[in-house]
Image (cartoon, rainbow, N blue to C red):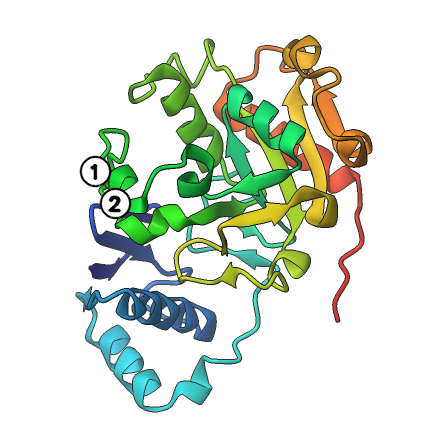
Amino acid sequence: MKIIIADHEYMILWDGVYNFPLSDYPRITPFELKKIFAFVDYEKKHGRETEIECGDEGVMLAIDRAKKNPDTYVNAALPEKITECTMCPQRGCVTKYVCHTTEPENAKKILSGGKLLSAARASKKSTDELKNEKRNAANDPADYFGYIMFNWGNCQGGYRLAAERMLGRFPSEDDLGKNFKPGVRFFFLYAEIERHPGFVFDGHLPAKIRDELLLKDYLTACVIPEALKKDFDGIAIPELKEKIFYLPQDGLGLWDWTNKVYEFAESLAFPIIRM
């Protein structure tokens, strides 16, 4: 694996290369250091070494000092907004919510079963089988498929991936614009997800949960495009019915729909519970 720290436009992990932007390149914050070392530690636990590259000598010196003095980053606080990637309307990742987004057919199974499952559990395939499937375009390692993946609540990435899977190919500009068909998004308070016994912070995603997560204990809201309402009527287990919301798409493309759904979730004003 390789981390490349630079003034990237956005953050992405693809084919073993983690393009890692900084919020104020070339200055690196304690939380950014925490993410880097969490990624290195996660990969090491799964038998993979990580190389770190940066064209700025000061950044590499800061990483070397932090490696020798972990107290400089271990207890770094999570910012209310992470501004390493600023492509979303909020100009950063807002850290109140995390979300999981999937295709409508998968969402039906999730709501009727009352739980999110890792790709391996949901497909009843081994993680090695999933790694070798054609749909693993990013060439993710096998262990990744043993977890449920979460993005920050205002991130468009999950909707983009769901669209790709529904189309069976990379979406075109029209697929994400005038012809956009949204998936279903499940929202969770990050402060609650990080207390789940299967929670993992891998330095890339805000959260991963091993194997499964019971929705009745953690779900704050499920947002479904209103056009799919008839398809979802009566599907969810009783404990989830009050947490399901339908929003009209009104012709919105990927970015505007993501923003609309996130603003709706924020309007629900669930309290953050910290223990």
Q: Nearer the viewer, residue 88 or 268?
A: 268
Asked where in the image residue 66 lies, by quadrant, the reply is: bottom left
Circle 1: residue type: Asn
For image coordinates 51% across by 40% down, the residue present is 155
On the image, numbered disc 1 is attached to which residue?
132
Q: Position of residue 204 (x, y in %)?
A: 39, 56
Query: Which residue is the site of mark 2?
Result: 128
**Image-based side of 35 in relation to 88, left or right:** left
| Quarter of the image where one finds residue 185 | top right
Q: Is residue 89 visible?
A: no
Disc 2 secondary structure class = helix
* Whether residue 139 is situated above or below residue 71 in the rendered picture: above
Q: Specify the amino acid type for callout 2.
A: Asp
Q: Quadrant of the N terminus?
A: bottom left
Out of 207 and 118, give the one closest to the viewer: 118
The local secondary structure at tag 1 comes to loop
Q: Position of residue 184 (x, y in %)?
A: 58, 27
Q: Are marks 2 and 1 in contact (CB under 8 Å)?
A: yes
Is 225 on the left-hand or right-hand side of 12?
A: right
Residue 61 quadrant: bottom left
Residue 195 — which label?
none
Using a 10 Å C-alpha cutoff, classify the residue at mark 2 as few (fewer than 14 neighbours), some (14 to 19) or many (20 or more): some
How much space separates mark 2 and mark 1, taking CA atoms? 6 Å
Instruction: Pinpoint residue 174: horizontal percent, then vertical percent.
Output: 38, 12
In the displayed structure, 267 sits above or below 6; it is above
